[in-house]
Amino acid sequence: MTDTIVYIPALHAGILQFLSESDGTVWVLGSDVISLIDEEFDYLRKEIRALKPEDSLTAVTAVLPSRNCKLLTTTELKKLNTKTTSLLLPQEDIFSWLYETHLPHAKISFSTTFLRWNRSNTLETHKPNTPIAETFAVANQSSDWWRQVGCALVKDGTIINTAFNHHLPSPYTPYIDSDPRNSFHKGEHIDLSTAIHAEAALIADAARKGISLENAELYVTTFPCPVCAKLIAASGIKKLYFSEGYSMLDGETVLSQAGVKTHKISEPK
């Protein structure tokens, strides 16, 4: 069985998704381990929304009654540092450090499921080989639980801007206040959401920076919704490359009549 170590400042759907990837004990970081980590990563103490570890344990135990959930103390941390221990950790800065400094003998695997912003994914730079690969890399920064969309703006063969769908005013908005979009099926009331779509975010950012979109190319992971299709049609973008379909195709006619050529390309391996 594979145990899991997790930091739970606030319990949300992303954490539950992460915990479903393993079947062993759920170890919730205790106060002494958090203090140990905080000596290296002092920003944890600034997490004003954070529950007390004991309250986090109570919450996750209530939601996952069939799982064995415990607080991870420094004593238990030492016991886990054996060759027979199999652990799943979030791919975050604090857990990479914890593995290198306190769990070098354990069998470790990392999950890329987005749980929170940290120094690693905030400052990370990544240079995929193609624009469409860049869109999928950018999409990984989205905290949206339903769909992660990324897009890249290309002019003269160079990527000059990227964006991903995100919620406003905060990436955590749907986990704090919920999202009105959750009440409807695919393709229904797409305007009722706390999220800004990747294409809209990119076009708005380009306007703010004074970037002309005339004759530009747009690469996006998923075909645009009707609203974003209208923005693209009016922006001056002339070519649209996408990899995945969307539940509404109303935008195809708008794009076509605006002279925007659309091309479906394969998702990068």
Image: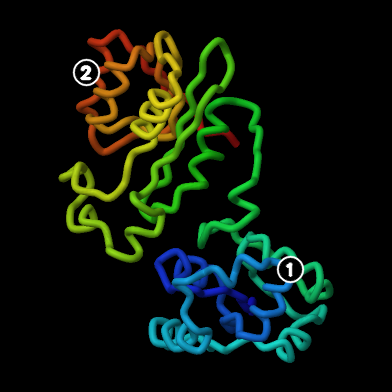
Is residue 83 left or right of 151 when viewed as pictured? right
* SS state under label 2: helix
What is the x, y in percent for residue 231? 28, 24
Going from N to C along the chain, the mark reached first, 2 or 1, is: 1
Give the answer, above or below, for where 214 lies relative to 176. above
Q: Which mark is residue 40?
A: 1
Amino acid at circle 1: Glu
Q: How is the image coloured?
A: rainbow
The quadrant of the rendering that contains the C terminus is: top right
For label 2, count other residues whose C-alpha is less than 10 Å away and answer few (under 14), some (14-19) or many (20+). Answer: some
User: Quarter-wise, where is residue 133 in the image?
Assistant: top right
Front tag of 2 and 1:
1
* SS state under label 1: loop
What is the x, y in percent for residue 2? 64, 76
- Name the residue that disc number 2 marks: 253
What is the x, y in percent for residue 202? 41, 30
Q: Which mark is residue 4?
A: none
- Residue drawn where x is 22% and y is 18% of the image: 254
Amino acid at circle 2: Thr
What is the x, y in percent for residue 259? 30, 8
The residues tagged by marks 2 and 1 sit, at their Cα atoms, a distance apart of 54 Å
